[in-house]
Image (tube, grey):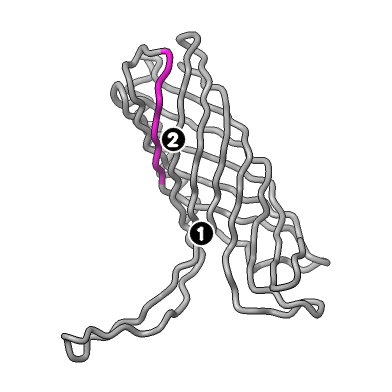
Amino acid sequence: MLRKIIIASLLTVALASSGLAQDHRVEISPFIGYTLSEGFTVNPVVIGGSVYDKINPTSGLSYGFMFNVFVNEGMQIGFLFDRQDSNLEAKGPSAKTEFADLNVENYHAIFTYNFGYEDATVRPFIMGGIGATRYKPGDVTGTDTAIMGSTKFSTTWAGGVKAYPSPSIGFLAMARWTPTYIKSDPAGIWCNPWWPGGCWQLVETDYSNQFQFSAGVTFRF
């Protein structure tokens, strides 16, 4: 799934950039920031005499890049990669333990709308994307931590501002939210009182959320 998302994103950007490169409308934006992370609940498990019922990637430094191509004055399509340096943390009613290093990587095809005129020196923007989040944990006492070692569907949503002191170089500041689907748990049965036999299984969906605040440089070609 991850490979297909990356290939599709790169092909889309390549096709768009082939027609626009002569107009210097390609942007490459490396950025660095800090990501606040939220975990998800699990069935209680006993480890070393302590009970744990939540898995949590810890907050930490993050960095990445965006590759964008203008398709008109305001709209861009592109690709975003982000990596967060984190730790795999388990929490319980009376315990909290970090078991291993954990890298959290985002891969998203992105769509950005820039407000204002094309030659404006300051342009606010909003962004949305679809793709995947990959969790890459280290080892715990020689045993692979497969509980978080997987790739999950995610979206990403952002807003920020770009400033261009020159036609070819700019700066950006951005706040971004990335909810990652983890699992769905049974949450009972609901029956329609006006429709005999109309009952449905309810589920409670768990997401792991990332909230990133970042800044970077934008190179325009």
Q: Is 10 on the left-hand or right-hand side of 62? A: left
Q: Which residue is mark 2?
A: 159
Helix or strand or loop: what does disc 2 sit on? strand
Q: Residue furthest front?
A: 94
Q: For the residue marked with disc 2, what is the amino acid?
A: Gly
Binning the other alpha carbons within 10 Å of mark 2 as few (below 14), some (14 to 19) or many (20 upward) gives some
Direction from residue 93 to residue 21 in the image, left or right = left
Q: Residue 188's quadrant in the figure?
A: bottom left
Q: Is residue 151 magenta?
A: no
For marks 1 and 2, give the one nearer the viewer.
2
Judging depth in this view, the residue of 97 and 108 nearest the camera is 97
User: Which quarter of the picture shows residue 128?
Assistant: top left
Q: Position of residue 220 (x, y in %)?
A: 47, 17
Q: Residues within 10 Å of mark 1 (few under 14, many from 20)?
A: some
Q: Image quadrant for the C terminus?
A: top left
Local SS, label 1: strand
Left or right: where 77 falls relative to 37: left
Q: Which residues are magenta?
A: 121-129
**Eyeballing the image, is 49 above or below 64?**
below
Picture disc at residue 49: none
- Residue at 51% x, 17% y: name it: 170
Q: Position of residue 99 (x, y in %)?
A: 77, 63
**Type of the residue with mark 1:** Lys
Above or below residue 84? Residue 112 is above
Q: Which residue is located at x 51 percent, y 33 percent?
A: 174
Please give the residue where the numbered disc 1 appears in the rendered image. Answer: 152
The CA span between labels 1 and 2 is: 23 Å
Q: Residue 61: x and y, percent?
A: 68, 41
Which residue lies at the image location 61% right of the left edge and 56% below the top edge?
135
